Amino acid sequence: MATLTFSTSSLHTKTLARKSVEHFPCKTLIHLPKSPNFESLSSVIKRKTLIGPPIRSTTTTISESLSTTTAPQTLKSRLKNGETLYGLFLLSFSPTLAEIAGLSGYDFVVVDMEHGPGGISQALSCLHALAAARTPAILRLPDSDAAWAKKALDLGPQGIMFPMIESQKMAKKAVSYCKFPPNGVRGSAHTVVRASDYGIDNGYLSNYEEELLIMCQVESEEGVKKIDEIASVDGVDCVQMGPLDLSASMGYLWDPGNKKVKEMMKTAEKGVLKKTGKGGGGGGAYLSGFAMPHDTPEDLRSRGYHMISGAVDIGLFRSACVEDVKKFKMKSADSDSDVDGIEIAKDGDEKYWSE
């Protein structure tokens, strides 16, 4: 065993003066060294005022006196001012892609519950992302049904789109689903839903009809026959043309560029524009539609369309992926034989439009 030896000569005795310390029962006093002097946080951190307009136009917040920003124009007000708006359809229900679309500069994004895989809960996440990007959202319903309309409207989109409207009666029903009694049949929970900022916006009931964009989609021969009646319904703000379903109803599935389909589209357009005129604002509904390979956004604008959707998020991503793989394969000498099996549609993203 090792032995430790200490030399007593190396130790010096020191008298420790006992300091009187006041004792407190059941507590331990810890004496900390004096802290160095720091500047206050307010003097160190520069104040930064974040000013960002709300995505939805409101007239009343918790306190109007605290509001220092001007609410942005709604889609409806911009249409009345004669603007032509350009947007994107979101089928992926990806909040990330929704936010990217908003930040890219689209005037609006249509969250598509008709052909996309998501429902109300997933749509809400996309609306949150679009709100962060200051981009108005439009919700396309899976069916022109009062229950779907109620749940969608409670989320607070700027616009709502009803699919497959084929008569004046159907259009009037769609409008009634969007309005509270006595003007409609919409169920009321305005004190707690997102549309009214969860009840914080006291002016919601006074302004919602003026701010909500109601869109009726015409996408069949029967609908085209009644399109002037649909466009004249009070409360219908836009008539959305559906070229793919229209071509299918005429027997030309996947051929919306067929001459007969083009003629039917022109007939439909004339029926809407009789009320509004090319410049819009004539008292009827505005013309809204999809760009196609044979019918570009510029073509639509020249014919009087005021809302134009030029792409689908899934289509854009698909085409980018296919092109990326194709480029790689083409540069690989060992994979020359595989190149022919990977082709991107000659017509671009719009080739696989989904209505």
Image: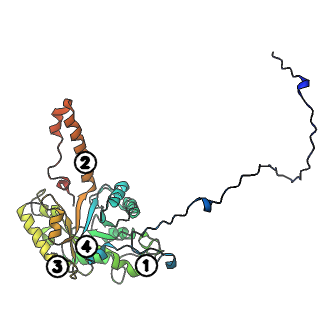
**Badge 3: how crowded within 10 Å, few (<14), some, or many (20+)?**
some
Q: Which residue is mark 2?
A: 320
**Badge 4: how crowded within 10 Å, few (<14), some, or many (20+)?**
some
Q: Residue at x 18, y 62 (%)?
A: 291
Q: Label 1's element? A: loop
The residue lying toward the viewer, choosing from 99 and 38, is 38
The residue lying toward the viewer, choosing from 137 and 65, is 65
Distance, label 1 to label 4, CA atoms, is 23 Å
Distance, label 3 to label 2, CA atoms, is 38 Å
Q: Which residue is mark 4?
A: 83
- Compared with 216, 318 (above or below) is above
Q: Which residue is mark 3?
A: 277
Choose the circle earlier in sequence order: 3 or 2. 3
Question: Do we see residue 185 in this rendering?
Answer: no
The residue lying toward the viewer, choosing from 192 and 173, is 192
Quadrant of residue 253 within the rendered picture? bottom left
